[in-house]
Each structure stands twice: as C-alpha cells, then as structure tokens.
Image: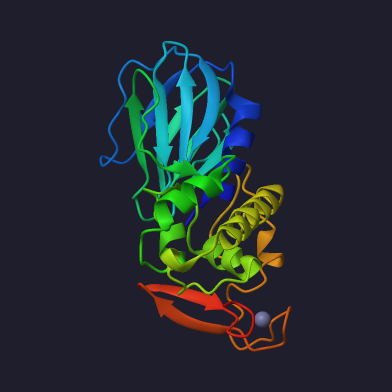
Amino acid sequence: MPELPEVETLCRQLRSKIVSSRIAGISILDSRLQLPEHVKGQQVISVTRRGKWIVIGLDDGRRLEIHLRMTGRLLWQEKEAALPMHCRLVFDLYSHQVVIVDPRRFATLSLAGGGEGHDGAVDALASRCAETLIAKGCKRRRPLKSFLMDQGIIRGIGNIYACEILYRAGLSPRRETAGLSPDDWRNVEKAIGAVLTKAIDCRGTSISDWRDLFGNKGEYQKELLVYGREGQKCHRCGELVHRERLLGRGTWFCPGCQM
Ligand SMILES: [Zn+2]
C-alpha cells in the first residue's frame, strides 16, 4: 500500500513532468470511477501532497485529488503507448499521458473546489509534529503503533513505516500513548522525520508491487531494520526480532531494545 514516501515520490515526479501542461482529456476505463467534469483544457498549476492524497491544482482554482488506496499506481507514458494491465484511467496531456493502474480498483479520483479541506490531522512531516502528537496522545490509552497509523491524527504513516519508526525510537508498538514522556514523543518525532525522509530519498519501498511514476522500484526495502525480519538478530542489541499481530496488522519489533 502506498504510504507517505511513495505518494511524495509520485508528487515530486509528477511536478517535474506535468506542471504547466494542459489536460487534453480524461478517459475512464473503469465504471467505478466518475468522470470529473470540465477539466478538459485546464492547465495544471501545482502538484502537492496532503497526507496520502495527491492534489493536482488546476488554473480555475479547483483540485483533482487522487488517493491510491491499496494497489493504485501512476505511470508516465508516451502518448498512444500500449496501456498496461489493470489500467483504470488515462490523463491525456497532449504529448504524454499519465495512467492510473490499480488491480484491486480501490483508488479514488475526485474534483474539489474552493479552499483546502482541513480535518485537524497533522502531516507526518510537518514541523511541530511532536506538539500535536503530545496534545492528542497524552490522554489516550491506546497502543502507540495504532495511534501513529490513525490518519485522523497524523497523516501518511502506514504499517511498514510505523514499524521502522518505533524501532528507531526504541519504543514498543504496544506502549500506551498516555504513558509516554515528552522525551519519548520527541524521539518519535525524530524517528518519523528520519525514516520518512530517507524513504523519500529512496523513492519508497518495493516489497511487492510499488513502482514510481516511471515504473522503477523504490530502494527503501534495503534499509529496513525491523520490518519483515522476524527470527533475525536485532542490529542494535542482538535479540531476535519478534512478529505478532497488533490490531489486525503484522507488527515487527525487538523485545530486547523497544521498551
Ligand atoms: Zn534490539
């Protein structure tokens, strides 16, 4: 599932390719997607990320918002290139096209007008992220990992990066948020920044089907310290990495050095 680093990678790559382009048309190949009206002829003026949303700003002030959900991908192609399997939508940009590829068909596309939607959640890479987390976490008795993956609190962290962030912070995924000290929260914030920034530099994690805008694999799978390493020695303390299910998700951690 694309998380913040993968979506940020797509946004950066899209920005370098489609800003200033005009939309010649949109072809919907999957009836589950709605055709946004009146976007033909619009110029793309920006590409930004909001949590895991890709937000394409148009010159009339509206925004095309794409969420890739489980298996969505975007692919940059020469115009008239053969469409890949599971293609659901084609943005025609005159000289090139961007297609949405999505085997499980959960990705969504919508057209929004007016100002930015604010849901009160903080972006995982926002400055002063720790203050928001302390304010929202200090009164809740819930496992830290599920707190970090709650998109209504902090936007952009999914399962892989939550495991890596907690390993780097030296905190157990099961720790209750209400029991964390200000220093713990600052360690969480530092770990979020370090893990996500490095993952963006690596263009995301290609454990299964993630590919960037140009069809290339990401590289962060080579940097994973705990995710997917059950039964192997912890790089930090030598204890064996443990895997368990926590609130329905596979969770990797070191019982020796994550307290
Ligand atoms: Zn350890």
- Report whether residue 217 is seen: no
Q: Residue at x 61, y 43 (%)?
A: 9
Residue 233 x/y as whole percent: 69, 86
- Quadrant in which residue 39 is drawn: top left
Q: Residue at x 49, y 72 (%)?
A: 173
Q: Nearer the viewer, residue 84 or 225?
A: 225
Judge whether 122 appears above or below 225 on screen. Answer: above
Image quadrant where residue 177 sits: bottom left
Point 62% across, 71% down: residue: 170
Q: Whole-percent x and y of residue 130?
A: 55, 49
- Residue at image x 58%, y 24%? 18
Nearer the observer, 161 or 177: 177
Closest to the observer: 175 or 43? 175
Q: Where's ligand 1: which quadrant?
A: bottom right
Is 130 above or below relative to 248?
A: above
Question: Is residue 162 shown above or below 83?
Answer: below
Residue 36 is left or right of residue 221, and the answer is left
